[in-house]
Image: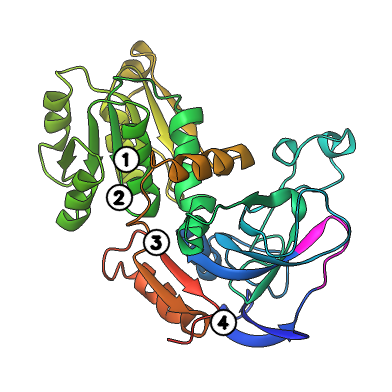
């Protein structure tokens, strides 16, 4: 176990290759986790494409990881070798005012992100702070647990915290990939009604209906906004969640809002935002807010919700590939091949 296989990204050349690298050793407060599965996320694509940047000369991507603890850096009450865990992608900086005062991970003012600020989980093993680990019961397969760490937790946090969706509020979700699909499921779970799913792909709309959307609309249809108005009884949306991150979808989502409607922007790109004329936005007391990530408590809640059958992620893993095929997984996500919710890599797999 002196060396391991890991996907390494060179930001200067934008090359991603699988290599043999030294296996890290945990210091006190850290754990070495054998990776069972790690998702391929659009944020990873943004790193590989140069939209997001890292200051490191080489880095292992992958921030949606789950696996088994194989080594602890010292006595760690509550944790043992063999524990099954899903990983919060954040690491406290240790130097901000909150960290110095002894605050929890989620309160760090300059939180560092796995796969951007330190090595991620597209590898056989990953080194993580013990504080980032969340226990996973045997009833949840680890490949499903992996996607809780972003693909599910980010839209969950957007719905329950940033948007603060309440029962019977109308919710529209633009973009039905990994983030949007789980936003639909979360909105349904907290009692939103109706939940309207929007995506140009008929297969994505059909899948959203099967997973809890009340209605599905093609956002490219000339009467898309009229359809939303009709489906909401003329009131418009209480909450519009954009998981696309493009200017055109955000503009449309903003126009679909009703009185006191909230627009939550989860998808990211370098597009400029255009919300339209100020007067109707101001008179309607509408709000627009960006959203990024989740808190550790959200993963903890989701583990409980999945265990109890409240959140169904049985269809969330669209494909599983060995680590050596990581570039193929990236290609499939970039080209939307097979309309995936989430593709995961399995470092222990050779098929």
- Number of the front mark, 1 or 4: 1
Of labels 3 and 2, earlier in sequence is 2
Query: Residue 232, position in %: x, y?
Result: 18, 22
Residue at the disc numbered 4: 15
Tell me how far mark 1 sits from mark 3, CA to CA.
15 Å
Residue shown at 65% from the left, 61% from the top: 116
- Segment colored magenta: 25-31
Residue for badge 2: 176
- Could you tell me how far apart the alpha carbons at marks 3 and 2 are, in whole angstroms? 11 Å
Residue at x 55% of width, y 80% of height: 348
Residue 342's disc number: 3
Q: Earlier in the sequence, mark 1 or mark 4?
A: 4
Judging by the rendered image, the residue that carries numbered circle 1 is 184
Relative to residue 306, is residue 86 depicted above or below? below
Asked if labels 2 and 4 touch by Cβ distance under 8 angstroms, the answer is no
Split into 4 quadrants, where in the image is the N terminus? bottom right
Residues packed near mark 3 inside 10 Å, few (<14), some (14 to 19) or many (20 plus): many
Find out whether residue 236 is within the magenta segment.
no
127 or 196: nearer the viewer = 127
Residue drawn at point x = 67 percent, y = 59 percent: 83
> Could one spot residue 243 in this view of the protein?
no
Mark with earlier residue (3, 4): 4
Decide which of tag 1 and tag 3 comes sooner along the chain: 1
Q: Pointer 1 and pointer 2: residues touching (CB < 8 Å)?
A: yes
Mark closest to the chain's N terminus, 1 or 2 = 2
Label 3 and label 4: CA atoms lie apart by 22 Å
Image position, residue 302 (x, y; %)? 50, 42
- Give neighbour class at mark 4: few <14, some 14-19, many 20+ (Cα, 10 Å): few
Q: In the rendered view, would you say 320 is above or below 118?
A: below
In the rendered structure, the answer to whether residue 198 lies left or right of residue 231 reads right
> Which one is in front in this view, the residue at disc 3 or the one at disc 2?
3
């Amino acid at each position: 176990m002196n060396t391991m296989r890991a996907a390494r990204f060179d930001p200067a050349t934008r090359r991603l290759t699988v290599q043999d690298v030294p296996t890290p050793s945990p210091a006190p407060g850290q754990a070495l986790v054998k990776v069972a599965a790690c998702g391929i996320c659009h944020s990873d694509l943004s790193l590989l494409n140069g939209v997001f940047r890292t200051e490191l000369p080489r880095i292992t991507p992958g921030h949606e990881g789950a696996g088994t603890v194989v080594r602890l850096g010292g006595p760690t009450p509550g944790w043992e070798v063999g524990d099954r865990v899903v990983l919060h992608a954040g690491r406290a900086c240790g130097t901000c005012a909150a960290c110095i005062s002894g605050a929890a991970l989620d309160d760090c003012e300059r939180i560092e992100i796995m796969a951007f600020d330190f090595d991620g989980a597209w590898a056989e093993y990953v080194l993580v702070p013990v504080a980032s680990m969340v226990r996973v019961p045997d009833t949840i397969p680890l490949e499903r647990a992996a996607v809780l760490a972003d693909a599910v937790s980010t839209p969950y946090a957007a719905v329950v915290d940033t948007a603060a969706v309440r029962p019977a509020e109308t919710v529209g979700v633009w973009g039905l990939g990994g983030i949007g699909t789980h936003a639909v499921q979360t909105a349904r779970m907290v009692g939103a009604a109706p939940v309207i799913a929007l995506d140009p792909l008929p297969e994505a709309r059909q899948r959203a209906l099967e997973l809890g959307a009340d209605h599905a609309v093609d956002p490219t249809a000339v009467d898309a906004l009229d359809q939303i108005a009709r489906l909401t009884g003329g009131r418009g949306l209480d909450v519009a969640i954009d998981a696309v991150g493009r200017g055109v979808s955000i503009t449309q989502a903003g126009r679909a809002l009703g009185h006191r409607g909230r627009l939550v922007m989860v998808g990211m790109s370098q597009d400029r935002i255009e919300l339209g004329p100020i007067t109707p936005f101001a008179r309607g007391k509408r709000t627009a807010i960006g959203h990024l990530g989740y808190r550790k408590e959200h993963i903890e809640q989701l583990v409980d919700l999945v265990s109890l059958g409240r959140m169904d992620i049985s269809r969330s893993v669209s494909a599983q590939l060995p680590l050596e095929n990581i570039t193929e997984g990236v290609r499939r996500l970039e080209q939307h091949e097979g309309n995936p919710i989430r593709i995961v890599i399995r470092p222990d797999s050779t098929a």
